[in-house]
Image (cartoon, grey):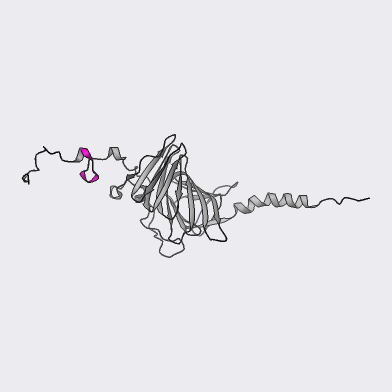
Amino acid sequence: MIRSTPIRFAPVLALALLLAPAAAAQQQVGTMVEVAGQVTGTPSGGAPAAMAVADPVLLDMKIATGRDSFAHLTLDPDGSLQLGAGAEVVIDRAEIDAATGASDSLVSVLIGKIRLALSSAFRGSVELDTPTATIGVKGTVLAIDVADPDAATVWVEEGEVDVTSKAGGTVAVRAGYFTTVRRGAPPTDPAPFDPESGAAAVRALPPEITAPHEDAIDDTPLRPADQDLPPRRDDRPNDPSRGDPQGQAKPNDPPPPGRGPG
């Protein structure tokens, strides 16, 4: 008669499955390099705690800044993320291909202004998720303002990104342009922003970011991110340099004072 032997691996397997999510949640995905004001980190399933310089940033940890506060952290392996006042982000995914070294990251921008910079050494992609849009990034510098859950504005400083509305529709946004995505609507046509106007989100953040592991990181403090959004193209004053028909001189218009008809 063949007797069966009880399987004793089930409890061990069950314990391993229970511990696996906890181990993943403790994965370090960055380091806090600059803190001003009130900055907290809330681990998955944990309580919020004050963050300080050199503190690890963990996978699924929500980083939040208070009023008149900012945070600057690395996004490993070759990225940098900055948060203006009243911002909240979560790094949901951070994977590196062992064979190629390419990284794949997902960052949720829940509210507020952030600035992402990827160094020239970066390989892979970063997806930014907001309540109204997703942004596909491959080596660039950009700023995002989620003013409220119903709208997100994306400014591109360097490179080009694809912005997709969760209601449908995608636009490619190149350097010097921005787009806004409102809930239930496609992205607006990319329009140029004027950094000298002081309205762009990039003016609320340091002007330069380099690779996060180099000494050349700009440590200029972030100013409170309380500036207005850039004016939309239709709201801007008529300007002949932009090719505005309303701003161009008409053939029958008199010449400017002091000048002849030429």
Residue 231 in magenta?
no
The relative height of residue 104 versus residue 187 in the rendered view (above or below) is: below
Q: Foreground: 81 or 55?
A: 81
Name the residue rendered at 37%, 43% in the picture: 179
Q: Position of residue 59 (x, y in %)?
A: 56, 52
What is the x, y in percent for residue 130? 47, 43
Q: How many marks?
A: 0
Residue 209 appears left or right of 242: right
**Whole-percent x and y of residue 83?**
44, 50
Q: Tell me if residue 23 can be seen.
A: yes
**Residue 165 x, y percent position in the rendering:** 44, 40
| Quadrant in the rendering for residue 132 | top left
Q: Which residues are magenta?
A: 238-245
Q: Nearer the viewer, residue 260 or 219?
A: 260
Is 1 on the left-hand or right-hand side of 248? right
From what the image shows, is residue 95 above or below residue 238? below
Quadrant hosting residue 147: top left
The residue positioned 21% from the left and 39% from the top of the image is 245
Q: Which residue is found at the position 69% from the left and 49% from the top?
A: 18
Residue 34 in view: no
**Any magenta on residue 242?**
yes
Farthest-out residue, bottom: 215
> In terms of image quadrants, where is residue 97?
bottom right
Say whether residue 33 is left or right of residue 44: left
Q: Residue furthest top?
A: 184
